[in-house]
């Protein structure tokens, strides 16, 4: 809506109403989103197992946020691989609103990027487990995921004769972004220096992986013509 800004601050998300902040440095927020484990907050891990209240993970530094295109939902992740979602109400007078645990990427696996689907009913997450996870934000369930590391190895096998094992620059997912206005395709910046392009299906699952080689990639953006552009590389080990 161009007037609200969301920021991850430690273990919470702050919503700032820019109409209420006239100073150069914004210090006051109007809503805080936080997570607290409770009995009804069961979730599903990436291996399909259930996470009960007694096993609820601890939030460790929220690092990624995405807001749905209709402005009604948010999805976020933390350094422990936890994925959260929340209903957004910018007109709410409640200063503290809950984050719901959507699922767990992988235990202690850093998440680098989250993104809503075109319908806003699903979300994607990816990070250092090299898997493009697919979540249902309404039922709080995990859908079918895409193992990006297998896609990378298949291309190496096909192009260089097979039998290869990648021992440097693991195919971590650093970031993904839509490259078409209708959100039917996304580009993923992979830690091995490549950009992989996936088609987004009507149920928000991804398929038809194609390899778009580049010398380096840590971030991806799309210009007005839908062409991917890669950003400066980072060493995954640093």
Image (tube, grey):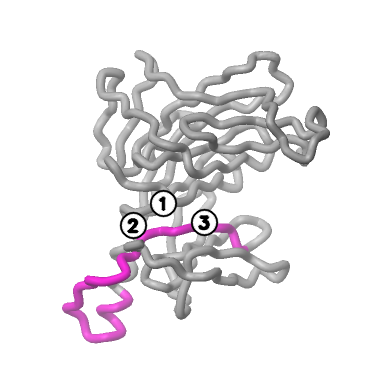
Residue 191 x/y as whole percent = 38, 66
Q: Are marks 1 and 2 in contact (CB under 8 Å)?
A: yes
Give the image quarter of residue 91: top right
Is 121 left, or right, of 141 in this rendering? right
As measured in the structure, the alpha-carbon distance from the residue carrying label 2 to the one carrying label 3 is 18 Å
Q: Which residue shows up at 73% across the image and 38% down it?
A: 25
Mark 2 and mark 3 lie on one chain; the one further toward the N terminus is 2
Q: Mark 2 falls on what kind of element?
A: loop
- Would you call the spot at circle 2 few (<14 residues within 10 Å), some (14-19), or many (20 or more)? many
Q: Which residue shows up at 56% across the image and 31% down it?
A: 13
Residue 63 x/y as whole percent = 48, 43
Q: Residue furthest left?
A: 163
Residues in magenta, as a range: 155-179
As measured in the structure, the alpha-carbon distance from the residue carrying label 1 to the one carrying label 2 is 7 Å
Callout in the foreground (3, 1): 1
Q: Mark 1 falls on what kind of element?
A: strand
Write down the residue under mark 3.
200
Q: Which residue shows up at 29% across the image and 78% down it?
A: 156
Above or below, 39 relative to 164: above
Write down the residue under mark 2.
130
Instruction: State yes or no: residue 227 in magenta.
Output: no
Front in this rendered view, residue 196 or 210: 196
Is 9 left, or right, of 30 in this rendering? left
Q: Which residue shows up at 19% across the image and 73% down it?
A: 165
Numbered circle sitting on residue 126: 1
Q: Are marks 3 and 1 in contact (CB under 8 Å)?
A: no
Q: Residue furthest bottom?
A: 160
Q: Mark 3 falls on what kind of element?
A: strand
């Amino acid at each position: 809506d161009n007037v609200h800004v969301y920021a991850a601050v430690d273990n919470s998300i702050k919503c700032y109403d820019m109409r209420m902040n006239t100073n150069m440095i914004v210090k006051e927020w109007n809503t805080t989103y936080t997570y607290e484990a409770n009995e009804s907050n069961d979730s599903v891990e990436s291996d399909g197992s259930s996470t009960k209240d007694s096993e609820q993970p601890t939030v460790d530094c929220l690092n990624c946020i995405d807001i749905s295109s209709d402005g009604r939902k948010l999805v976020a992740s933390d350094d422990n691989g936890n994925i959260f979602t929340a209903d957004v109400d910018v007109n709410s007078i409640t200063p503290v609103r809950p984050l719901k645990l959507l699922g767990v990427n992988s235990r202690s696996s850093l998440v680098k990027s989250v993104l809503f689907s075109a319908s806003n009913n699903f979300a994607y997450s990816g990070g250092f487990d090299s898997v493009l996870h697919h979540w249902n934000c309404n039922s709080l369930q995990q859908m079918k995921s895409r193992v990006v590391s297998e896609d990378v190895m298949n291309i190496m096998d096909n192009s260089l004769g097979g039998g290869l094992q990648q021992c440097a620059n693991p195919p971590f997912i650093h970031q993904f972004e839509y490259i078409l206005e209708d959100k039917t395709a996304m580009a993923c910046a992979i830690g091995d220096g490549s950009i992989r392009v996936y088609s987004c299906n009507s149920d928000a699952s991804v398929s038809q992986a194609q390899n778009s080689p580049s010398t380096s990639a840590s971030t991806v953006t799309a210009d007005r013509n839908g062409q991917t552009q890669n950003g400066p590389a980072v060493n995954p080990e640093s």
